[in-house]
Amino acid sequence: MAKKHNNVLPGFNLSLGFTIFYLSLIVLIPLSAAFIKTSSLSLHEFWVAVASPRVVASYKLTFGASLIGASINALFGLLTAWVLTRYTFPGKRIIDAMVDLPFALPTAVAGIALTAIYAPNGWIGSLLAPHGIKVAFTPLGVVIALTFIGLPFVVRTVQPVLEDLEAETEEAAASLGANRWQTFTKIIFPAIAPALLTGFSLAFARAIGEYGSVIFIAGNMPMVSEITPLIIITKLEQYDYAGATAVAVVMLIISFLLLLAINGLQWWSSRRNASAI
Amino acid sequence: MSGISTTQFSKYSARVAKSRATSEPVWVRWALIATTLLFLSLFLFMPLAAVFSEALRKGFYTYITALADADALSAMKLTFIAALIAVPLNLVFGVAAAWAIAKFEFKGKSILITLIDLPFAVSPVIAGLIYVLIFGLQGWFGQWLSDHDMKVIFAIPGIVLATIFVTFPFVARELIPLMQAQGKDEEEAALVLGASGWQILWRVTLPNIKWGLLYGVILTNARAMGEFGAVSVVSGHIRGMTNTLPLHVEILYNEYNYAAAFAVASVLALLALVTLVLKSIVEWYAARSARAVEKN
């Protein structure tokens, strides 16, 4: 396995051995337990567990809300990254640091804070309630929570690409008669598109698995505002370990596919950037 | 005199033309800044403000009482214990993984990097579930553990394991690209000068990666202290025993004890703010030392 060439540095076997040992112990063997547990189910039992109407409704909500949340983040994340790299305004450095808040703030805290704001008697909820708009305890609340937790991804993937963008190409476009909007759509956007797509996928992947921030604001009504991770918890609490694991395996497979897609995207964008230089 | 002013004017007009061509009109600029600030206020600043405002709503005395509560203190202790075990273990793993991946060539390297990232892609709830399948009463080792009067699930070891899982990739992810960029020239030079492997690690590699390492530790610690989903599955929510701070927030909230829930939440929010400040400081130092390296 070790193709050392003429590498003289020590510690290869020790470091790789420990890495694989620790990875297997903490991640690989426990994850395989989910697949082994599910293989004890018959195909019919598996289907009943993962495709009952209540579970299917939770997939629709989880994926739908994650998609909307990630799209909101793609739009506003791009805008935030743009404003932070291109413009100067007072408090910019604090804003820049604060973008990472959703990474640092425990999800349960985010969940109860968002619920407090969007509940019918909350700061924003009380403004919306007279117009008949309910956010907390509806699927809309799920979207709000998933938008919050995915916020940093697009900003942090697009920002470095925008910073590295050469001014010359934009100047060339301008000197050739392009207006600012044309320069953005034809020159800048294609350059940041891979990073934007990567950030979107990261936010989407994170949103699908999210639990802590959602359960407080969702209301958790079966068929309406119940997310898939909550279905797993509910099945566990009813000691339906096989059913919980079957739903988990469906989510795991989807997550793995997303991870592969994200890695492919990053490979594509780094190759594009490398060829541009 | 007039010559100078003409050149100055043409310089000025050139600058104006340039800034018009490669930047936006002032009103567009301010509209974009305003939209961004509105979005970030709604999604970042308002939730943060809500935590502190709700926490102090019933007055400072209620706030302090909620924090000095025995269950809150024991939750705090458990949160620190979990982080204190998870962070060093993942730190050692991160250095080992980055050493193998950055300093050597081997088959399957990109698969290994993807596998290290795996815990990021797994829902926290599933992270908890897989340990229940192994160590729970009906799990692989459940019978053996109960025969020997040991508990992992609904006990502290399960909480620690779940915390290790969800924070698994942070340090490795920071160090791998950093050490790949630094190459191995310095380590090889140290080797030629007669340093042993451990001497190279302590005297050459670790000083070179200290900011990346610290950055990874800060991220790991923040996630370890704040993890909710994974820990919630394995904890069993036994007050005063297997409750971490985020779980304690949930329990208080579900008991409609909002003031206390937000009081405990405000401690976690403060920790998050401290994390962001430390992170910014480390980023600043890392950028400075990177510039110093470039100059040399």
Image (spheres, coloured by chain):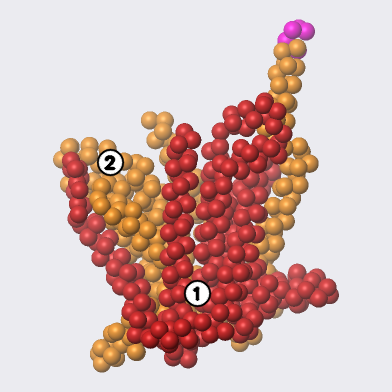
Chain colours: A red, B orange
Secondary structure of residue under mark 1: loop
Residue named by callout 2: B184
At which x and y percent is residue A193?
57, 47
Q: How many marks?
A: 2
Q: Along the horizontal axis of the image, is B95 left or right of A249?
A: left
* Circle 2 SS class: loop
- Are the residues flagged by discs 1 and 2 from a single subunit? yes
Q: CA distance from mark 1 to mark 2?
A: 39 Å
Label disc, if present, on residue B88 of the rendered structure: none
Part of the protein shown in magenta = B1-5
Q: Is residue B276 above or below residue A140?
A: above
Asked whether disc 1 touches disc 2, contact meaning CB atoms under 8 Å apart, the reply is no
Q: Is residue B260 magenta?
A: no
In the picture shown, does residue B288 fall above or below A105? above
- Which residue lies at the image location 54% right of the left edge and 74% below the top edge? A211
Left or right of A108? Residue A41 is: left
Query: What's the magenta bit mostly, secondary-structure-wise?
Result: helix
Chain under numbered label 2? B
Q: Quadrant of residue A136?
A: bottom right
Q: Who comes first in sequence, dot 1 or dot 2?
A: 2
Q: Position of residue A144 (x, y in %)?
A: 65, 68
The amino acid marked with disc number 1 is: Phe
Q: For mark 1, what is the residue?
A: B228
Q: Quadrant of residue A53?
A: bottom right
Above or below: residue B91 compared with residue A94? below
- Amino acid carrying label 2: it is Lys
Tell which subunit mark 1 falls on: B
Label 1 crowding class (10 Å Cα cut-off): few <14, some 14-19, many 20+? many
* Residue A125 percent location from the top left of the image: 75, 73
- Name the residue rendered at 73%, 16% in the picture: B10
